[in-house]
Image (spheres, rainbow, N blue to C red):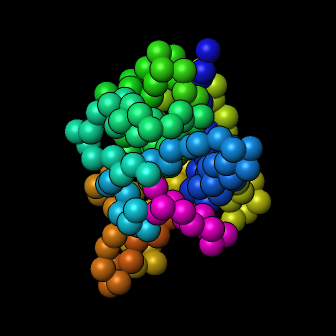
Amino acid sequence: MAKLYFRYGAMNSGKSTALLQTAHNYEERGQRVLLAKPAIDTKGAEHITSRLGVSREVDLLLAVDDDVRRLVADAGASARIACLLIDEAQFLTVEQVDDLLRIAVLDGIPVLAYGIRGDFRTHAFIGSSRLLELAHSLEELKTICRCGRKAVFNARSVGGRFVFDGAQVAIDESDADAVTYESMCAQCYLRESGGLLG
């Protein structure tokens, strides 16, 4: 039986790099993979790009109301799909994550979803929460905080200052309000937030 995998980590833990390496490994052995990401992730438009500079066009750009299982079935009509790889899986809906489980279990296609668990306020993303509930396998991809400890939180900075309120998703902002993210350990996060969690 194929499985649903959720590989998660804080920002800059190498999730996109790992996804692209997995795609390469399958294709090197003559296997066909599908790469997908939610359309809400507008950075890189229709590409998955790692911080190492490797980039690849996605096969499926998923809108909020897309039926993922149907799209994968349509894509697999011409040739068998060996694996479905999803980047930025935290932005998926509950229904789309449910489809990922169906694709793995009922359609026999392994699904590897990559994403972050929580937002800059330490709240779970809907897609990540559902993946934590359904995935057969959970794997944490690790990164470090500026202090050298293991990073588990994502802090948002706007115009060079950390913020702890606002919309859950902020990807493309004007240069004057440049939004960046930094992965942090719990101690550094609590120091920057004045002890606030969410």
In the current view of this chain or complex, which residue is farthest to the left?
65
Q: Nearer the viewer, residue 117 or 1?
A: 1
User: Does residue 11 lie above or below 69 as drawn?
Assistant: below
Residue found 75% across the figure and 54% down from its top:
149
Whole-percent x and y of residue 72? Answer: 40, 35
Whole-percent x and y of residue 190? Answer: 55, 52
Q: Is residue 22 left or right of residue 64?
A: right
54 falls in the magenta region: yes
In the current view of this chain or complex, which residue is farthest to the bottom?
176
Q: Nearer the viewer, residue 175 or 80?
A: 80
The picture quadrant where one finds residue 42 is: bottom left
Image quarter hosting the C terminus: top left
Q: Nearer the viewer, residue 89 or 104?
A: 104
Residue 36 in view here: yes
149 falls in the magenta region: no
Image quarter hosting the N terminus: top right
User: Does residue 177 lie above or below 152 as drawn?
Assistant: below
Residue found 54% across the figure and 35% down from its top:
81
User: Does residue 145 lie above or below 75 as drawn?
Assistant: below
Q: How many marks?
A: 0
Whole-percent x and y of residue 104? Answer: 52, 23
Whole-percent x and y of residue 8? Answer: 59, 41
Residue 101 in view here: no
Residue interval drawn in magenta: 47-58
Residue found 54% across the figure and 63% down from its top:
56
